[in-house]
Amino acid sequence: MASSKTATKDIITLRGSAAIVSEFFGYAANSILYNRGVYPEESFAKVKKYGLPLLLTQDEGVKSFISNLNSQLSEWLEAGKLQRIVLVIMSKATNEVLERWNFSIQTDEEVVEKGVSREKSDKEIMREIQAIMRQIISSITYLPCLDEPCIFDVLAYTDKEAEVPITWIESDAKLIENPQMVKLHSFDTKIHKVDTLVSYKNDEWDEE
């Protein structure tokens, strides 16, 4: 007997898409901070998200930093003004940049200008995000060991005319010289497309 299968399309609005992307960044940041050992393992608690066991910081300072960041990102995403967001891991002692987790964002201009919506199933978006999360979790298999105390910072690249709150300061790009790069999966809400790339310090000895 043939079973009929109905495909459902979920309507994605600009606000909904902004919420998906900023929430993704919050979970991705937590996952990076945990997997790269920036904060002690015991300061994280397990949650289930995107069909995966993920870890969230219980450190009040980091929690409020990420939640403030999320609401600011949502605002910029809804305005179509966010081009990329970069989580930078630096040496605590020297401030040398060791890793840059780069999330670049393409926005569907028509949605921002005309307020139209797009269609894509939530399940499909979740699957794409899940693939990126899995890659972040497995990143410890290819990234060099961070064997010193580290700190992190977040850089946001916005359009010139974007409103920037006073809590944000102008920064240099905190680049790494001659980095190694690994491109991760991307996900697309049909309104915002997010491409992920990690670049890191190449610690190989130079061959003379």
Image (cartoon, rainbow, N blue to C red):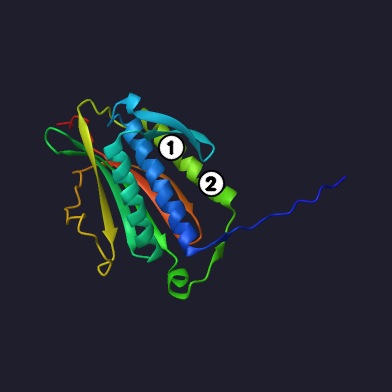
Q: Nearer the viewer, mark 2 or mark 1?
A: 2
Q: Residue at x 27, y 55 (%)?
A: 156
Residue that badge 2 annotates? 126
Q: Is residue 85 above or below residue 207?
A: below
Residue 77 in the image: x percent, y percent?
Answer: 38, 60
Q: Is residue 133 above or below residue 74?
A: above
- Cβ atoms at labels 2 and 1 below 8 Å apart: no
Q: Is residue 142 visible?
A: no
Q: Residue furthest right?
A: 1
- Say which element carries label 1: helix
Residue 80 in the image: x percent, y percent?
Answer: 38, 65
Residue 76 in the image: x percent, y percent?
Answer: 34, 61
Three-letter code, disc 1: Gln
The quarter of the picture where the C terminus appears is: top left
Three-letter code, disc 2: Met
Q: Is residue 132 visible?
A: yes
The disc at residue 135 is 1
